[in-house]
Image (spheres, rainbow, N blue to C red):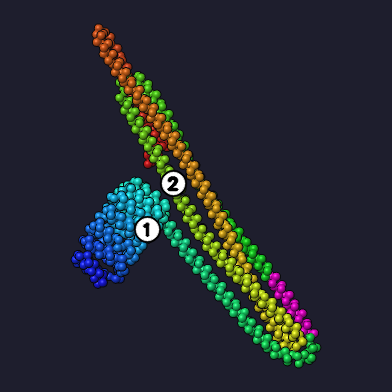
Amino acid sequence: MEQFGHDYARLCAAAGAAPQEAVLRRLRELDGARGRLDLAAESLSLQTCGALGRLLPGAAPVAALALGDCGLSEEGVRLLLHGLCSNTTVKSLDLKGNNLRSMGAEALGKLLRQNKSIRSLTLEWNSLGMWEEGFSFFCQGLRANNVLQRLDLRNNQINHQGAGELAMALTQNTSLQELDLRWNNVGLLGGRALLNCLHSNKTLKRLELAGNNVPGDILKAVEQALDHNQDREVILSEAQSQVNILSKEVLSLKDEKNKQFMDFMDTVDKQKEERARSEKMSAARVSQLQEALDEQYSIMNSLKSKLQMTEAALALSEQKVRNLGELLNAMKQEQNCVAESHFRELQQQKQEGADREGRLLHDLSAASEKNLLLRNQVDELERKCKVQQDQLFQVKQDLTNTTAELKLRAVEAEERLEMEKRRFKQSLEDVESLRIKEVGRMTQHMEASERSMHNRIQSLEAIRASLEEELSQVKTAALTDRGQAEEELIKARSQARLEEQQRLEHLEEKLRLMTESRDEAQSCCLKQKEMVAEAQAKAKQLSLYADGLRKRLDELQQELDSKEEEKVTELNKVKVELQEQIGHLEAERTAQDGLREKIAALERQLKVLSSNHREALLDKEGEISLLLEKLRMKEAEISRMREEEAQRASFLQNAIMAYVQGSPLGTHSSRK
């Protein structure tokens, strides 16, 4: 826009620098409808950055600002971001490829703390992770921000410490939904820190960690946590929509009831007007009736008989009222049946919870059986190690020349033991990770159900309060209508007594009018009583349902507490068992070290004996023939013993391999 171009030129002139033509052209070409200011790949000077920093606080049409690959200096970045701190229109900011360092990271942290409008921030191809203090300041700003929804930190040389700082910031951030950390150096520790922060952060929906040397299991766990967050967002949106629908229905019901009440009041007013008119007409006719009173005195007996008939009709109407009361009792019984059906449904839910507990107990028993099998296998391996040690002692005492072969076999056995230990530890770690994941899933599911039930209870309590208010209003209206009807009945009776002495035709018309008004009043009273009874029944049902929900919440809380206690006890047992196994393995290691020392002592003894033997050979040259024969005999025995020992070693090796391949531990390791 032209105004922004003029302001930019004026600010550059005030700073004593010439405005950049490319920036001036982009400012003049700024589209007010789109609101995007694209200065990417433009080399911005320090004076231009200062001028833009002064323009941005009042830049109303600018909604997106692109400053990628601009080669910004630290001071220029500080000036630009200082101007954006008080801006309220920019929603998207792109600063990729500017090699931002410590001062830039601090300015970004200040921007995130103060700005309340930026939804998307792109910081690709910078060096924020190389400066720990600046990056920690940036993470503090992210922790305090509650507006930013998308953050791009690709290729920023972020290590595991920076990932830890970022995870601490995400635990308190409640607005960020997308985070891109591809092509950094987060590593195993950083991946674990980010995974741990997802347990408390429930708003992050997308987290990219490719090219960070993060193990596959952590990436899968992160994906599962993000899926849980997305599911939670969907459930919350559905619950909110249901709450809105229920509130709309409640408002519509209130409007309908208000309309019905107003219609009822209008009908009552009309009836009052009609009665006033009839009273005026009756007062005008009284004079005429008094003149004809003497003539119609003989007809009074017939009128009395008709009055008796009307009393009989009143008795019939009372009988109808009783029948209606019986119908109300039947309706109450039906409502009790509905309450019993709700109670049965709650019992079914409890039975389902008990079935889930049984399944979990069955899984725990299976895990304990696996632990027992592993213990038995370790005991058998220890026994076989002891047998092999005894055989090694015998072989060392018998054969001095085969020590080298035995050493090689001992080294192979140690390597196999270490491989078995590693496999065993890895299997235990897998079992523990599976248990932790299952427990986390159960806790998340229970938390979501508790929140939904709590929201539902609050909405039901609000509905109950509104219904109680409506009940009180209906009761007051019914009482007032009843008083008015009674007063009207009293007036009608007095008028009937006065009109007994009047003419027959006028009395019949008056009685007909009074009976119609009485029937209408009774019907209105019955309708009001039915409405009150229905409202009371609804209130009772809602109260019973709320009590059932509260009991269900208490039961679920108790189940959670018991499951947490069982989890803690199982973890303690597993830790104790692992410590015992580690102690056994260390004892075996010490025993093997003692065997090595004994082998070295035997070798030294063999050397001493060989030296003595040589001296004896020098002293006894005359006995060479006899010694040669003895040596031949000994060599034959040694060869025979070597063959026997080789056969024994081959038999032992075959037996060990067969046992390892046939044992459950061997099958487990081969499957892995």
Between 304 and 194, the one lying in front of the other is 194
Residue 419 in the figure: left or right of residue 331: left
Q: Which numbered circle lies on residue 161?
A: none
In the picture of the structure, the residue carrying the numbered disc 1 is 145
Instruction: Please tell me whether residue 74 is drawn above or below residue 367 in the rendered image.
Output: below
Amino acid bearing label 1: Asn
Q: Which numbered circle lies on residue 436?
A: 2
Q: Which residues are magenta?
A: 301-323
Residue 525 in the figure: left or right of residue 172: right
Residue 261 seen in render: yes
- State which quadrant residue 553 falls in: bottom right
Q: Choose the circle earlier in sequence order: 1 or 2.
A: 1
Could you say where residue 214 lies in the image, as x and y percent from the top left? 33, 48
Estimate how packed mark 2 is, as few (under 14), some (14 to 19) or many (20 or more) residues with alpha carbons within 10 Å. Answer: few
The residue positioned 46% from the left and 48% from the top of the image is 439
Residue at the top extreme of this rendering: 622
Residue 149 seen in render: no
Could you say where residue 466 lies in the image, as x and y percent from the top left? 56, 67
Q: Main secondary structure of the magenta part?
A: helix
